[in-house]
Image (tube, rainbow, N blue to C red):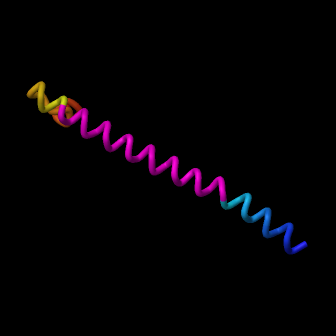
């Protein structure tokens, strides 16, 4: 019985770690996207922040 519950807990723990990893990757991708958008806005002499607030 004890061994079975331990295995089940391990199976539950694995997907959670994968989810956290995916979330971190998504956050990093979003941050990179924000940086590129900001640099594009600066190149156009029209910051995205200003356009969003209008």
Assign the C terminus to one quadrant of the image.
Answer: top left
Q: Nearer the viewer, residue 1 or 44?
A: 1
Position of residue 31 relative to residue 7, above or below, is above
What is the total number of numbered labels drawn onto the structure image? Answer: 0
Q: Residue furthest top?
A: 44
- Percent position of residue 22, x then y: 52, 47
- Percent position of residue 31, x then y: 32, 44
Residue 34: within the magenta?
A: yes
Q: Residue furthest right?
A: 1
- Percent position of residue 51, x then y: 19, 30
Q: Is residue 23 left or right of residue 38?
A: right
The quadrant in which residue 39 appears is top left
- Percent position of residue 45, x then y: 8, 28
Q: Is residue 35 left or right of residue 9?
A: left
Q: Residue at x 79, y 62 (%)?
A: 8
**Magenta highlight range:** 14-39
């Amino acid at each position: 019985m004890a061994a079975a519950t331990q295995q089940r807990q391990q199976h539950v723990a694995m997907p959670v770690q994968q989810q956290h990893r995916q979330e971190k990757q998504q956050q990093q991708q979003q941050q990179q996207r924000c940086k590129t958008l900001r640099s594009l806005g600066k190149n156009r002499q029209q910051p995205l922040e200003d356009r969003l607030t209008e």
